[in-house]
Image (cartoon, rainbow, N blue to C red):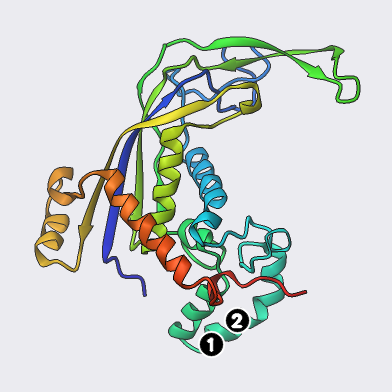
Amino acid sequence: MFQLNEKVRLTASLVFDTAWRVGSGKEGETMSDLGVMLTTAGEPILPGSSLKGKLRSTCETLSHALGLNACMLNHKASGVKCTSDVDYYRKVRDDYQKALKKGLKNRCQWIDKHTCDVCKLFGSPVKAGRLWVSDGMLKDWASVVQVRDGVVIDRDSRTAVDGLKYDYEVVPPSSLFELCIDLENPTDADIALLGAALFEWCAGSSLGGFTSRGLGRFHLEEIKVFGVDLNDPDQQLKFLTKTDFAERFSNLGNWESYFSDRIKQQLQSAANNQQSPNPAGETEED
């Protein structure tokens, strides 16, 4: 049975350095061919699903450097056995059903063995994730949507295809959003992996559509990290009886130090266990 023991909350400002777009999948408000997602008030939307997807991709890229495993949702390509891959799950589904009948402890051990480190954090078909990302809260933008021209390129001749011109909407640069990321019962490995992704995002990354054209470049600012330990009676009482954020959560100090310490611990742990098999990241032998 799930028991909430610890919660970590991270807030940050996300600033777009270039124009960007999260497509709506339909014609734009400006009658352009490819619109961007807007609220009924005409303001740009930064969905939590887009943020979480980008965060997961970043964590997958950095996991190996931390000695952690990522199935990349394809165990044949990654060599990591994980139930997030549908084909692999079909192979072990009967084994999973047997584990269910042997009790909760056996079930949890089976899931832990057949789930990669990234999926333990973000979730898999048989395991709930420990990380949640809220929609970005818009704080500032240019209050206008721009329209740009595009053409279809012939990959063989590398020239524009006649008659296949289109236009698309973008949101101008300097858009500012406030982010909120929650972690429930995180492990040290979870915090190290998230921390590595945050350092990467602070240095600069890209988000949304048409990133190969230079759109969607962003960076993070003003990162703050808070937490609550529900095993501490005083913190538990405040969390359960207070409504003000500052009273429910404690400031965990400088975010760089907080995550750097966990990253160093994870690197040391990975070095110590380099010669030992990792049950959460078993690789294919066939």
Mark pair 2, 1: CA separation: 7 Å
SS type, badge 1 = helix
Measuring from the top left, give residue 162's x and y in whole percent: 87, 11
Disc 2 residue crowd, few under 14, some 14–19, many 20+, Cα 10 Å? few
Asked if labels 1 and 2 touch by Cβ distance under 8 angstroms, the answer is yes
Q: Position of residue 238 (x, y in %)?
A: 11, 56
Residue situated furthest bottom in the rendering: 102
Q: In what quadrant of the picture does the N terminus appear?
A: bottom left
Total labels drawn:
2
For the C terminus, the quadrant is bottom right
Instruction: State whether residue 135 is above or below residue 150.
Output: below
The residue type indicated by label 2 comes to Gln
Kindly identify which residue carries mark 1.
101
Which numbered marker is on residue 171?
Answer: none
Q: Amino acid at mark 1?
A: Lys
Compared across the picture, whether 151 is left or right of 102 comes to right
Rendered location of residue 179, percent (x, y): 36, 36
As drawn, the residue found furthest toward the left would be: 234
